[in-house]
């Protein structure tokens, strides 16, 4: 009788140990190695690389009617990826996408020039096309606002690795024309900016 009890107890302990090693939710679970494990790991790696929505930031310099001189110009964009491609670490702004964002720039030298704006656009390969609305304010050394303008600024851009170069005209839609004859070609005001793009 005692021998039967001991045999049954041993069988129970052995079967319980085997179950705990094969059940994923148990602390003693052991990962299986082999072809199935490799496929699962590879699939998880692919899913982690791809993001339908990305948050990107950029820092750079700008000049033109929109910002006067933006040093620095800071911004962030949220983009919706169109194609299912893996992201590459040194090329965060890769592929085709729609994006929206906001930015600000400033130049402080005795007085100050401060600009805030919002933008929306499309990226097709290395080419970007976007539109932005921004407000530029000039402040005196006493911190009084002496001039203010709102502008519409369509731009075409080129993305090369982490660098993003944009160029386009500027149209005053409200307020003072602060620059008047500055930063223009044949009386046609323009903007230009060069930014470094990175992911959050």
Image (cartoon, rainbow, N blue to C red):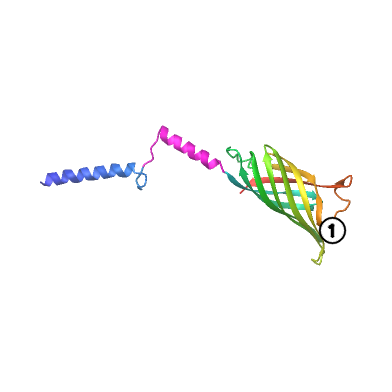
For the question of whether residue 129 can be seen, the reply is yes
Q: Residue drawn 12% across and 44% down? A: 3
Residue 116: quadrant of the picture: bottom right
Q: Does residue 41 appear left or right of residue 67 in this picture?
A: left
147 in relation to 27, above or below: below
Q: Does residue 131 appear left or right of residue 45 in this picture?
A: right
Crowd rating for badge 1 (residues with CA inside 10 Å; few <14, some 14–19, many 20+): some
Q: Secondary structure of the magenta portion, mostly?
A: helix
Q: Does residue 15 appear left or right of residue 73 in this picture?
A: left
Residue 12: quadrant of the picture: top left
Magenta span? 30-51
Q: Name the residue under label 1.
A: 176
The single residue placed furthest to the left in the displayed view is: 1
Residue 85 screen position, x and y as percent:
58, 37
Residue 28 is a magenta residue: no
Number of numbered discs overlaid on the protein picture: 1
Residue 24 screen position, x and y as percent:
37, 44
Residue 69 screen position, x and y as percent:
80, 52
Q: Residue drawn 73% across and 41% down? A: 157
Q: Does residue 187 appear left or right of residue 27 in this picture?
A: right
Residue 35 is a magenta residue: yes
Residue 97 screen position, x and y as percent:
64, 42
- At mark 1, the secondary structure is loop
The single residue placed furthest to the front in the displayed view is: 173
Foreground residue, 10 or 147? Answer: 147
For the question of whether residue 106 can be seen, the reply is no
């Amino acid at each position: 009788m005692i021998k039967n009890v001991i045999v049954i107890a041993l069988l129970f302990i052995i079967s319980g140990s085997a179950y705990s090693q094969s059940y994923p939710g148990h602390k003693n679970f052991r990962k299986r190695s082999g072809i199935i494990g490799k496929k699962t790991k590879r699939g998880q790696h692919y899913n982690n690389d791809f993001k339908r929505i990305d948050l990107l930031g950029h820092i750079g310099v700008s000049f033109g009617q929109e910002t006067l001189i933006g040093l620095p110009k800071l911004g962030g964009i949220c983009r919706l990826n169109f194609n299912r491609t893996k992201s590459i670490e040194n090329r965060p702004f890769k592929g085709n996408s729609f994006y929206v964002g906001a930015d600000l720039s400033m130049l402080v030298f005795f007085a100050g020039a401060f600009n805030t704006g919002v933008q929306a656009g499309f990226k097709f390969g290395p080419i970007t096309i976007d539109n932005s609305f921004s407000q530029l304010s000039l402040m005196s050394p006493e911190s009084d606002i002496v001039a203010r303008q709102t502008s519409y600024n369509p731009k075409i851009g080129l993305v090369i690795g982490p660098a993003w170069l944009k160029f386009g005209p500027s149209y005053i839609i409200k307020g003072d024309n602060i620059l008047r004859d500055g930063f223009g070609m044949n009386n046609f005001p323009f903007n230009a900016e060069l930014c470094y793009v990175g992911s959050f």
